[in-house]
Amino acid sequence: MVATALGNRSSSVSCGGGEVPMAPWVLDLSRLKIGDFVKQGYHGTLFRGEYDGRDVAVKLLEWGGDGYSTPEQIDRLRASLRDVAAAWHPIDHPNIAKFVGAHVGTSPPPDTACFVVVEYLTGGTLKNYLINHMESKLSYKNSSTWRWQWPEG
């Protein structure tokens, strides 16, 4: 699908005659399989997929699809994604979804797509859980557990 169209990427890029290693969070798109559509969001489309045999969530970011974003705005979004990926990549905590990697597309096409890949988690978001259970009282055990988990991440 999309990942196949983008082809393989090496673990380094040429720059001024030398090889510069890619960041550790950069995805090898040849190992990414994008599967079923999950949900359309404001900034992109969520798919279920597989990366190296792991069940993952793949967010395809659709920057510029609105027809109003300038190339400069899209470049800033890509730079921000690089910063987030670099910060999220080393985090390994039981209360935080595991970041698998990202692909920050570059110009020229067809390599303009940007992806964020995280472990696939079932059960929905905390926000949806709280909205769906607004009428029920939270047990003391759950509220105590959550109070301890929130500061930990």
Image (cartoon, rainbow, N blue to C red):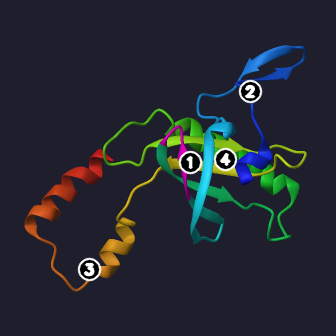
> Can you see residue 77?
no
Q: Earlier in the sequence, mark 1 or mark 2?
A: 2
Q: Quadrant of residue 133?
A: bottom left
Q: Could you tell me the amino acid type at mark 3?
A: His
Q: Secondary structure at mark 1?
A: strand
**Residue shown at the point (86%, 60%) measured from the top left:** 70
Instruction: Give the residue number, with chain letter if any, for mark 2.
Output: 10
Q: Position of residue 21 (x, y in %)?
A: 70, 20
Instruction: Give the residue number, with chain letter if any, for mark 1.
Output: 117
**Residue shown at the point (35%, 66%) measured from the top left:** 126
Q: Earlier in the sequence, mark 3 or mark 4?
A: 4
Structural distance between the alpha carbons of marks 3 and 4? 34 Å
Local crowd at mark 2 within 10 Å, few (<14), some, or many (≥20)?
Answer: few
The stretch of residues the image draws in magenta is: 48-53
Q: Earlier in the sequence, mark 3 or mark 1?
A: 1
Instruction: Give the residue number, with chain letter if any, for mark 3.
Output: 133
Q: Secondary structure at mark 3?
A: loop
Local crowd at mark 1 within 10 Å, few (<14), some, or many (≥20)?
Answer: many
Is residue 12 shown in magenta?
Answer: no
Per the rendering, the mark at residue 137 is: none
Q: Is residue 143 left or right of residue 73?
A: left
